[in-house]
Amino acid sequence: MHESETHLSEFQERKLILLLCCIAAIHVFIFSAAFPFFNNVDEQAHFDLAVKYSQWQVPRKLEPVSAESARYIGAYGTMEYMVNPAKLPDGKFPPPLWMQPLETAAPELVAGESNWRKVINWESGQPPLYYICGGLWWRLGGWLGFDGLRLLYWLRFLNIPLICATVWTGYVAARLIFPENIFGRFCVPTFIAFMPQPTFYSLENDTLSPLAFGVAFIGLTKFLCEETPGAVWGIVTGLALAATFLTKMTNLPLLVIGVVVVLLKIFHTRKSKSLRALFPSIATMAISAGLLAGPWMAWCRENFGDLTGSITKTRYLGLTCKPFGEWWHHPIFTPHGAWFFLSGNLGTFWQGEFLWHGGRLTWLPADALYTLASLFLLAVAAAGLWQHRAIPAPAQRAALAFALAVCAAGLTFYALLSVIYDFRNCTNPSPALPYFVSGRMLLGTLIPFMLLFVYGFDRLLGRFGNRAKFPALASMVSAMLILEITTDWPVFFSQYNWFHL
């Protein structure tokens, strides 16, 4: 990247990043408050686990929804995500139960709670870190006096400190990779702050993945690029890798790439005969990661039958592995299938998977725009990695190559899952659309992805100075925000949301 034409003191720069964190907090607060409970992206299941962990109840199997969770889901849930009001008798949704007279609402409350008590929480085997944080936040909300729908939104507003921390982590990563380019350092946290991803407006363990792996990415980059990374960074990196593992099982391919980075560093250091100096950071990284991840793996092996707790959920959802010979007949190996897979994952990576009135809450051409922009700018970034003139610093080239490997690993993992499973008894994915297309589960790659995206963006504008680059950034961010507001505008009028309390 080209040397910056704009000079700010470190104090001024950090004040601007803090301002971006505040903007991100307001962004997430407004949209989190606008979306009613409970959305179509398994919010009920994640809420139930947060409530169980708040009571120190760690599931030992796929358990039913708890009585407390069922009361909240039955009382405050809405049909607006899944049902088109045109199909209702009077063409509109009934008022929320908490707005109805008690004698009218009571039978429905009892029926709703009873129905949800029969539902199996298929996410019971998910790693515990997000739910521990959510459970503690839930208890804090109760201690502060919140109850009912206000307590529900308090739990969802946990995403506000998470997005602020993610924006700051993105800035730290950008400062590490682009130390001489102020445009690159501001671009990464700006895109994160304004990203129109509705997962950040929901109760989802995916919201913790960008932060956990973002810290791990910084630690591994330092480990990769520095001659003798210290033991302190080994501890920080090990804890972050453990947090990534303990947040969501779909982060496993990112951890695999992390292990590969460590092995490459060991191999390179062995050749230079300075492996002994590397030992403290490797040892502390392995010990700190193992001390946190090991007990959970043992718990899963004892209670769910495997080290990750995934097999029970896979069986419950009706997924079975196909014979190896049938893998190659998958439509993903056709141009149309490959485009469907890429646009499905990259489109939902930016715009999410929420439904509204039975249809996906998005402007479909935007999926194509986000997909094409992502593929194009990542291709520009990848091309730059092969040109030594574009990135003269070996450390910067290695860090961006690491980021590219992380993004490729995430997509490859979902392509592999799409190919190997038979979805005969599953609805999403299904036999008609046998693809894993869920961008929210790729959010662990958010910071590495944004580093590549911004590097490609900067290369594209390479002929121009910062006086042209920053207006281009402002134009892109404004377009993203306008598109998000236009798309989500109907949600703000829901009687079931925070604004109608």
Image: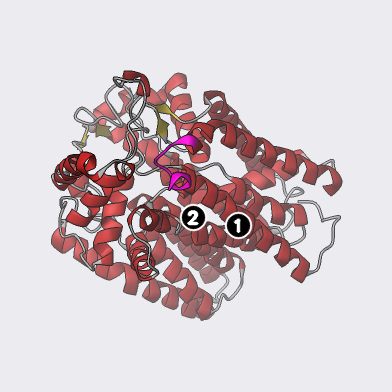
Depth order, front residue of 393/34: 34
The reply to whether dot 2 and dot 1 touch (C-beta < 8 Å) is no
Residue 235 in picture, x, y percent from top left: 46, 76
In percent of width and height, residue 169 lies at 58, 62
> Is 475 situated left or right of 119 in this image?
right
> Spatial distance from mark 2 to mark 1, Cα to Cα?
17 Å
Q: Which mark is residue 317?
A: none
Image coordinates for residue 14, horizontal then vertical, percent = 71, 66
Disc 1 crowd rating (10 Å Cα; few below 14, some 14-19, many 20+) is many
Query: Vertically, is 144 above or below 245?
Result: below
- The three-letter code of the residue at mark 2 reads Pro
Say which residue appears at 32% left-offset and 27% top-offset. Answer: 434
Left or right: where 153 falls relative to 391: left
Q: Give whichever of 286, 58 is nearer the camera.
A: 58
Classify mark 2: helix, strand or loop: helix
Q: Is residue 497 magenta?
A: yes
> Given this view, does label 2 or label 1 mark the residue nearer the observer?
2
Count the marks: how many? Answer: 2
- The answer to whether residue 350 shows anywhere in this view is yes
Magenta part of the chain: 493-501
Would you identify the image quadrant in which residue 459 lies?
A: top right
- The answer to if 351 sits in the magenta stretch is no
Image coordinates of residue 276 in percent, x first then y, are 50, 80
Q: How is the image coloured?
A: secondary structure
First of labels 2, 1 by sequence position: 2
Q: In this rendering, would 351 be left or right of 92?
A: right
Residue occupied by mark 2: 210
Q: Amino acid at mark 1?
A: Ala
Q: Mark 2 Cα within 10 Å, few/some/many (few <14, many 20+)?
A: many
Badge 1 is on which residue? 399
